[in-house]
């Protein structure tokens, strides 16, 4: 696969994550005001989308293993654009739930998991796969940096409905561009998409067991719980220790940027660590960062944010790299899909659980519990290796 195609896929991931994952957090308050509904009820539509995504992920992974990942991604991106426009044109709390239940299918179809399967099939050597995955996640990792303020600006200028239409146009355009740049050598059509979505699977290939998948299904969601819990509660935890809200948000805003150095390093052909040590190193950095965040003081705070973010940046790379190494490109999509089911559930549960526990016992205790979780993940990883 040409480097140009890898960069195009990465830019597509930036938009896909920005539109389908990060933008909803900005839309939450405007939707609450527009529907005159409790915030938890409005937030529930997004949680429903994550749940549907978790359920659909293994099926999407199997399709990616059959070489139909690009067609599924094209269908998912265009379907997402259409759903967003319909939602904006027919706004209500009920249509919000209906739209996001189907957008959950789109999440499964166009976020990282099928991309990692596509990239894995394109590279025969593990080093090339790691560099390609790192490149994709470098650009994809900027989604929060671009779309949190970007969506806020769109809402301020056009209202939430106008912002959603603009996001729909953006994801439609980038889906077409990525298809032309990255997938133009693939002969796909409307029939190809229908076959990808509804076609029968190779029963022997898809039903064969995945050795060792049980351990990964536990380890990777554990890391996602930690990641989502900290990233969503970091501002609140800093405010609780006495920082002004604006300064706390500024500190937390460095989180996304600080995930990039490790990914950039691993995109270098001269840096190719084995997958298990890479995963263990990412957990160790997160543990150090959390321990620093437990300690009060400005130096510890900055160390905690920077080191933890660096660890999470590596954790994004390590799972697909390990899965490709363990199962090969032929079955990586299915394995990633099975793992993604637990990851999406963890991603939905982490923020709520950490917020509730932080209010009850304080964020120091929460961060300590997350350290314990990561230590257990390291132990299980070493045992399964």
Image (spheres, rainbow, N blue to C red):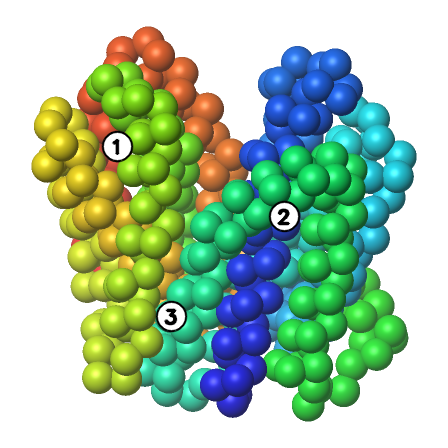
Crowding at dot 2, Cα within 10 Å, few <14 / some 14-19 / many 20+, comes out as many
Disc 2 secondary structure class = helix
Name above or below for residue 311 compared with residue 353. below
Quick one: 164 or 83, which is closer to the camera?
164
- The numbered dot on residue 370 is 1
Of the pair 330 and 242, the residue shown nearer to us: 242
Residue 274 sits in which quadrant?
bottom left
Residue at image mark 3: 134
Q: Earlier in the sequence, mark 1 or mark 3?
A: 3
Q: Which residue is mark 2?
A: 20
Does label 1 or label 2 sit earlier along the sequence?
A: 2
Eyeballing the image, is 37 above or below 99?
A: above
Q: Is residue 197 left or right of residue 46?
A: right
**Is there any visible trace of residue 69 in the rendered image?**
yes
Q: Quadrant of residue 249?
A: top left
Q: Residue at x 27, y 63 (%)?
A: 261
Residue 125, x across and y down, in percent: 37, 87
Q: Secondary structure at mark 1?
A: helix
Tag 2–tag 3 contact (CB < 8 Å): no
């Amino acid at each position: 696969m040409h480097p140009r195609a890898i960069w195009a896929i990465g830019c597509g991931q930036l938009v896909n994550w920005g539109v389908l994952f990060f933008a909803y957090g900005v839309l939450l308050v405007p939707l609450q005001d527009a529907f005159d509904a409790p915030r938890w009820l409005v937030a529930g539509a997004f949680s429903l989308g994550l749940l549907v995504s978790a359920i659909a992920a293994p099926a999407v992974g199997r399709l990616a293993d059959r070489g139909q990942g690009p067609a599924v991604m094209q269908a998912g991106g265009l379907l997402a654009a259409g759903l967003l426009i319909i939602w904006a044109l027919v706004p209500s709390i009920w249509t919000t739930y209906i739209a996001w239940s189907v957008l959950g299918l789109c999440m499964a179809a166009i976020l990282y998991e099928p991309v990692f399967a596509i990239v894995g099939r394109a590279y025969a050597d593990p080093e090339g796969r790691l560099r390609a995955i790192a490149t994709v996640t470098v650009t994809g990792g900027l989604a929060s940096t671009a779309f949190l303020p970007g969506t806020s600006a769109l809402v301020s200028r056009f209202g939430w409905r106008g912002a959603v239409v603009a996001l729909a146009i953006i994801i439609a355009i980038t889906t077409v561009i990525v298809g032309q740049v990255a997938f133009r050598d693939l002969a796909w059509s409307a029939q190809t998409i229908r076959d990808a979505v509804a076609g029968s699977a190779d029963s022997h290939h898809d039903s064969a067991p995945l050795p060792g998948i049980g351990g990964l299904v536990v380890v990777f969601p554990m890391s996602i719980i930690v990641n989502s819990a900290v990233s969503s509660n970091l501002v609140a935890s800093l405010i609780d220790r006495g920082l002004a809200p604006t300064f706390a948000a500024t500190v937390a805003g460095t989180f996304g940027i600080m995930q990039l150095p490790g990914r950039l390093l691993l995109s270098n052909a001269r840096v190719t660590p084995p997958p298990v040590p890479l995963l263990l190193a990412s957990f160790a950095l997160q543990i150090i960062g959390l321990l620093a965040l437990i300690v009060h003081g400005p130096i510890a705070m900055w160390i905690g944010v920077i080191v933890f973010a660096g660890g999470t940046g590596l954790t994004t790379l390590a799972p697909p790299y390990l899965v490709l190494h363990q199962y090969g490109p032929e079955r990586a999509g299915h394995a990633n899909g099975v793992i993604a089911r637990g990851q999406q559930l963890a991603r939905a549960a982490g923020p709520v659980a950490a917020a509730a526990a932080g209010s009850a016992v304080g964020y120091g205790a929460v961060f300590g519990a997350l350290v314990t979780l990561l230590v257990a993940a390291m132990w299980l990883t070493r045992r399964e290796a």
